[in-house]
Image (cartoon, grey):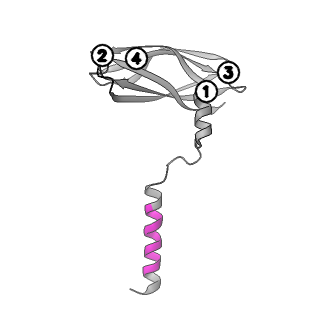
Amino acid sequence: MGKIAKGIGGLVGLVVFVNLFSPADKGSSTASTSAAKAVDEAVTVGSFRWSKEAFGSVMEASFVISNRNNFPIKDAKITCIHYAPSGTAIDSNTRVIYDRVQAGGSLAVSNFNMGFIHSQATRSRCEVEDYRRA
């Protein structure tokens, strides 16, 4: 193989390597640390209740999403982390609520199926991981 072919092969390998280990959603609204912190402070989950349904295998949650931004939001991504009796985080579920929350408003979500849950989960905490401007 010639020097040019080896150089091109090395360049292609480098591009593949970089793409494998770089974040998939470079255009996310929470790409920076300050933006992620703003998400936590401006849009929150409150009045959180949950239960295990379907013979203890599915998490069903009720909560209120509050939007303290001066603009409406939509498609809030909610992540719930589940804990064992020992306090160890053992599982998590993430779902998107495909609805709008007006500026300064809130949205009540009742009996929402969050998916399968670990059988030893006894405690859970949910938060807004991301959202989009409406």
The answer to whether marks 1 and 4 mark residues whose Cβ atoms lie closer than 8 Å is no
Identify the residue position indicated by label 4 in the image: 60
Q: Amino acid at mark 3?
A: Gln
Q: Say which of marks 1 and 4 sits in front.
A: 1
Q: How many marks?
A: 4
Asked if residue 75 lies in the magenta stretch, the reply is no
* Residue 65 visible in rendering: yes
Give the x, y percent position of residue 37.
59, 33
Q: Quadrant of residue 61?
A: top left
Towards the viewer: 31 or 1: 31
Q: Say which of marks 1 and 3 sits in front.
A: 1
Q: Residue furthest bottom?
A: 2
Q: Which mark is residue 41?
A: 1
Q: What distance separates the C-alpha of mark 1 from that of mark 3?
A: 16 Å
Identify the residue position indicated by label 3 in the image: 102
Towards the viewer: 98 or 7: 7
Over which residues does the magenta segment extend? 6-17
